[in-house]
Amino acid sequence: MRLRAKLAVRAAKLVSKIIKRMNRGSGLTLPGKVALRIDPDILSELAGTVREKVYAVMGTNGKTTTNAILYAALETQGKTAVINRTGSNMMNGIVSAFVLAADKNGRIDADYACIEVDENASKYVLPKLKPDCIILTNIFRDQLDRFGEVDLTSKTVRNAIAQVPDAVLVTNCDDVLSYSIALDLPNKYLTFGISQQFFDDKARSEIKESIFCRNCNTKLEYKFFHYGQLGIYHCPNCGFKREEPVYTAEDIVYTEDHTYTFTIDGVKIASSARTPYSVYNTLAVYTAMAALDVPRDKFREAIEGFNYGNGREDIFSINGARVQLHLAKNPVGFQQKVSLVLKDKRPKDIIVLINDNDQDGTDVSWLWDVDFQYLADGNTRTICTTGIRRYDMALRFKYDDIECQVVDDLKKAVEELTHKGTKNLYIIVNYTALYSTNHMLHEMAAASKDAAGGFTPPRDIEAVQLEGSDHSRPGVKSIGTRSLTIGHLYPDLLNLYGDRGNIQCMKKRLEWRGMRAEVIPFQSGDEIDFDQLDIVLLGGGSDREQEIVCGYLKEIKDDFKAYVENGGTVIAVCGGYQLLGKYYKTPDAQIEGLGILDFYTEWEPKRLVGNIVLENERYKMPVVGFENHGGRTYAGNNEPFGKVRAGYGNTEKSGSEGAVYKNVIATYLHGPLLPKNPEVCDDILIRALRHKYGENVILDPLPDETEKRANELLVKKYAAV
């Protein structure tokens, strides 16, 4: 080994030792950073000394658990392996795993390496790591402010894998995105998938993404969905279809013990997995071992002894209560947690903790793409929200007619609910709260009198009133004669930024005032009669989806323009905003707009991403939201939607955001826009009601405490005077 590499290893080990002695953290990323500063080629050097094979595990959901399963399976076969066990999957964390596993002379005593790799970091890591096999679990929408649209994630992953053409790609053929990447690369690939429909309806969100053919842009037809876009699909136009997987799981059964049994390659496995997606993770590992001819005779033994909790689905006994901790970091993952909770028919309490730190993603609009309404019938007694964005989460529950309480002190809430509650508590957190919450629960379990005892059976009680604030929904007045019909245009294509939250907000704020609200979703290809619509929502989507939508919009251009000119009410968000203009010029094409408003948009490499605060003289409250756009919109003589107090707006330099024309409000603000800005929502409703009924409409005030708190949090954080 080179002298520089030896120095890098020794320096990294010293840094790790100092961090631990000073109790300043786990020391799992800084050592790698130090090692790279001394020797930029240290990863290639150390990975090259692994005796047999190197695995890289990638994908939006499941990569940490999949990597842990792979490590356990190899260990059961008598093999040793390097692993970045805690999910430190960026370059620094990966290098740390290697340097800390090496001896002081830089020697790695390991047969294999099991390395989890972040999708965005893969373009830097894979060429250095040079894996023999890459597992790609799936690709979903995740942290739009960091990863961008799912097409960008797919492109990043594809380009990264292309740099290591000798690596065998193990891919999930039930996922059209992962499978399409395999077909587009020179790498040898091996597929896994599940042909048995074993996910329940609650696991499948109403929002479906990436369900259009990657070859011809035709909407795919599905025999059934598992969850997200995973399922059995084919294109009715060009014939593209999901292939029969080389390896599959069969005879999948959810047992009375709330665990899954299944058969892989003729071997029946009784696992401790409590979630259906864990079957996918296990199958991915078996396929990856087969891809490199790794012995698998002890695979069943490994899986039946594996703890699927892995720090992300752990169970604790606290004050006699069964407390489950779960991680949920994107809409597809959270939907699986909702399904898991509902499988438990016993009385239960739930705490949801949502943060918006950088590692979580500062855009929380994804919460509106989870079908929480099922929890209303889930035998749930007390629901609490906490964390930095606790009011956003409370708002999400409010507009699904779910009672909840907002609490500031998580530990105190857990203490009260384990003493006074149902004795069956679920805690669901996003990323940055996971390890601190896990540590807190371990301490509480150790301090609990029954730490070594069992669980008290769940009990059927009334909701526990905790110290905090009650954010109940308003009472519904008796329905009167007034009504509005809301048309949601192309939600199967334009659905990126929680746009259905805007629909839900308008609908509920009408119903709470005793007015009828009918929502008509118009899918791609549907005929649209604007004469029956009082409000039109055109939401946001990726550049690819916008280009598809453009074809449909051209067919209704004249009718849409007439609707606007006659005073019809429109709210257009992000991609929908861009499509109302003359054109949107991207790096690859010029997408022709409807030309209804006098502006145009041009793409630039730097995306304008972050929370945004506007001033608008029509509203007493500042207008808040989140922006994430590569386009710069030059709005001409249009009245802006607002003056930018914090953020970017139409361009970095314009100082203004959005455009208003007649009863059209076009804006880049999502989050979604309306729930945290009730005055804007009511303004839209008033415009539509006045246009329909021809009279001066005044809406009764609603109790908007939750809305105001969510709004104030962003104003204080980003635009404090």
Image (cartoon, rainbow, N blue to C red):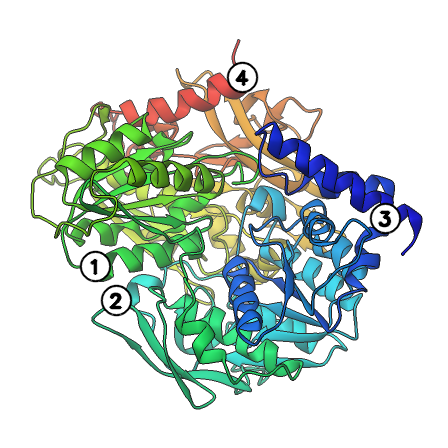
Gap in angstroms between the C-alphas marked 4 and 1: 43 Å
Nearer the camera: disc 3 or disc 4: 3
The mark nearer the N terminus, 3 or 1, is 3
Q: Residues within 10 Å of mark 4 (few under 14, many from 20)?
A: some
Disc 1 secondary structure class? loop
| Front disc: 2 or 3 | 3
**Element under label 3?**
helix
Residue position marked by numbered label 2 in the rendering = 258
Q: CA distance from mark 2 to mark 4?
A: 48 Å
Which disc is residue 344 wearing? 1
Numbered mark located on residue 719 in the image: 4
Compared across the picture, whether 612 is left or right of 467 comes to: right
Which residue is label 3 attached to? 6
The answer to whether mark 2 and mark 3 are in CB contact below 8 A is: no
Q: Quadrant of residue 306?
A: bottom left
387 or 256, nearer to the observer: 256
Q: Is residue 328 left or right of residue 474?
A: right
> What's the amino acid at mark 3?
Lys
Distance of mark 3 from mark 1, alpha carbons?
53 Å
